[in-house]
Image: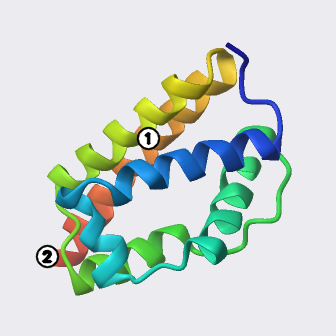
Amino acid sequence: MKDIQTQNDLYQLVDTFYQRLLADPAIAYIFTDVVKIHLEEHLPILVTFWSQAILGTGGYTRNLTQLHLDVSAKERLTPELFQIWLGHFNASVDFLFKGPKAEQIKTQALSIAAIMQIKIAAQEK
């Protein structure tokens, strides 16, 4: 099994990840009812984000924290939802890739989930 090396690898990862998320009724409603994402528009944005984070390509200019705070203001993003998100993310990585970059992206996802939960909790005070 190969490691994450290209933006095409990241596209495969986020596509697999979102297939898992959208098939899970415990979390799918966030994407289908609350945010109403359009995958064909959303996936390239996620590829750019992860490419910047893992491959160092740059190009992601959105405020990741604020986007999640805005979603949580509509429908609270609970620690349980983050655990589901992280479980599907890690399972998608492990299904497709193995190596230092695969481990790095899982660590980065865990860090993002932790930071988002801290920021959401702080906003609620």
Q: Is residue 83 left or right of residue 105?
A: left
In the rendered view of the protein, which quadrant contains the N terminus?
Answer: top right
- Residue 26 x, y percent position in the rendering: 17, 57
Q: Is residue 51 left or right of residue 104?
A: right
At 25% from the left edge and 46% from the top edge, which residue is drawn?
Answer: 84
Q: How many marks?
A: 2
Q: 10 Å neighbourhood of mark 2: few (<14), some, or many (≥20)?
A: few
Q: CA distance from mark 1 to mark 2?
A: 29 Å
- Residue 73 x, y percent position in the rendering: 25, 84
- In what element is the residue under mark 1? helix
Q: 10 Å neighbourhood of mark 1: few (<14), some, or many (≥20)?
A: many
At 56% from the left edge and 71% from the top edge, which residue is drawn?
Answer: 39
* Residues marked 1 and 2 touching at CB (< 8 Å): no
**Mark sitting on residue 89:** 1
At 74% from the left edge and 59% from the top edge, which residue is drawn?
Answer: 48
- In what element is the residue under mark 2? loop
The residue singled out by tag 2 in the image is: 125
Amino acid type indicated by mark 1: Phe
Query: Residue 31, relative to residue 6: is it above or below?
Result: below
Query: Residue 116, relative to residue 31: is it above or below?
Result: above
Q: Earlier in the sequence, mark 1 or mark 2?
A: 1
Query: Residue 12, relative to residue 115: is it above or below?
Result: above
Query: Of 116 and 102, which appears nearest the observer?
Result: 102
At 27% from the left edge and 57% from the top edge, which residue is drawn?
Answer: 117
In the rendered view of the protein, which quadrant contains the C terminus?
Answer: bottom left
